[in-house]
Image (tube, rainbow, N blue to C red):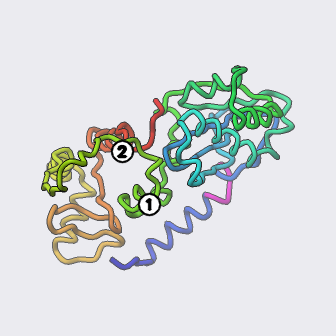
């Protein structure tokens, strides 16, 4: 559906623009305050967040994310996590190099702590360790659920290919062989139903009527009214935000979706 930039949308845009350019969202880096660098890596991308800690809590200073290069896709997860720290510190060197107090690196992988103290390193790891030795920091392991900002940056939708099959064919080194191919038989085609997704859709369909805002927009669209950037998916009878299914305010559904996209081996998030 076309994007409608009406007076209501313009008003919200102005509010957001003002918020991003004024305190407390806009803030300069303060070298005298405790500093935290959160890092996370998926199979395909890296993410990091730099924050100062003041009396009111963490205040984000810088966000960064990037795709892994083709040769980096085949790195082991501990090398990817090590690489993420190196790239983040290179990007933030101007902030972190001259700090008088050590800053803290938060990661959801124990292996990052091992690299700093290990004396047996590959040539690449030794090169990275030499660079990291220029900085004064400590590494703290945090569960992935507590490093949410960096996790979100390493799982940005535009970091993933639009067509997964095309990506797998071009980057087979990024995937483990799950099923061994039987080369003694002719290829056969089967039609299967992925029950986990059908169950999820049914669950969403039952819960949408408990969300007042969802129900209101749904009824407006059902009457043929135009509602901002929302549209109606006719088969599943669910709301779409642009081309994506809008999830109702239901913690159980939201948790199930996060588990499907994060805990699955194919989700590319092997941290804890």
> Pointer 1: residues within 10 angstroms few (<14), some, or many (20+)?
few
The x, y position of residue 97, in whole percent, is 83, 39
Identify the magenta region: 20-24
Q: Is 191 drawn above or below residue 56 in the view shown?
A: below
Q: Upstream in the sequence, badge 2 or badge 1? A: 1
Identity of the residue drawn at 15% across and 56% down = 188
Q: Is 114 drawn above or below residue 127 in the view shown?
A: above
Looking at the image, residue 226 sits to the left or right of residue 202; the answer is right
Looking at the image, residue 203 sits to the left or right of residue 108; the answer is left
Using the rendered view, name the quadrant where residue 19 is placed: bottom right
Dot 2: element: helix
> Pointer 2: residues within 10 angstroms few (<14), some, or many (20+)?
some
Dot 1: element: loop
Residue that label 2 marks: 261
The x, y position of residue 196, in whole percent, is 20, 44
Looking at the image, residue 9 sits to the left or right of residue 73; the answer is left
The x, y position of residue 166, in whole percent, is 39, 62
Q: Which mark is residue 161?
A: 1
């Amino acid at each position: 559906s076309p994007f409608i930039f009406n007076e209501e949308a313009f008003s919200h845009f102005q509010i957001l623009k003002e918020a991003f350019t004024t305190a407390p969202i806009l803030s300069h880096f303060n070298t005298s305050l405790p500093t935290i660098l959160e890092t996370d890596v998926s199979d395909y991308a890296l993410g990091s967040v730099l924050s100062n800690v003041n009396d009111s809590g963490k205040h984000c200073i810088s966000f960064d994310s990037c795709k892994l290069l083709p040769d980096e896709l085949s790195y082991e997860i501990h090398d990817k996590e090590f690489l993420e720290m190196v790239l983040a510190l290179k990007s933030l060197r101007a902030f972190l190099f001259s700090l008088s107090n050590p800053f803290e690196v938060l990661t959801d992988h124990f292996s990052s702590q091992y690299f700093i103290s290990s004396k047996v390193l590959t040539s690449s790891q030794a090169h990275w360790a030499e660079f990291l030795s220029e900085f004064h920091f400590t590494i703290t392991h945090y569960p992935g659920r507590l490093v949410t900002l960096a996790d979100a940056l390493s799982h940005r939708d535009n970091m993933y290919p639009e067509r997964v099959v095309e990506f797998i064919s071009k980057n087979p080194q990024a995937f483990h062989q799950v099923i061994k191919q039987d080369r003694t038989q002719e290829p056969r085609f089967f039609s299967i139903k992925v029950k986990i997704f059908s169950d999820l859709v049914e669950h969403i369909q039952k819960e949408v009527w408990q969300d007042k805002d969802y129900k209101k927009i749904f009824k407006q669209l059902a009457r043929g009214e135009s509602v901002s950037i929302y549209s109606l998916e006719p088969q599943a009878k669910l709301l779409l935000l642009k081309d994506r299914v809008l999830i109702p305010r239901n913690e159980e559904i939201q948790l199930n979706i996060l588990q499907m996209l994060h805990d699955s081996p194919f989700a590319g998030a092997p941290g804890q």
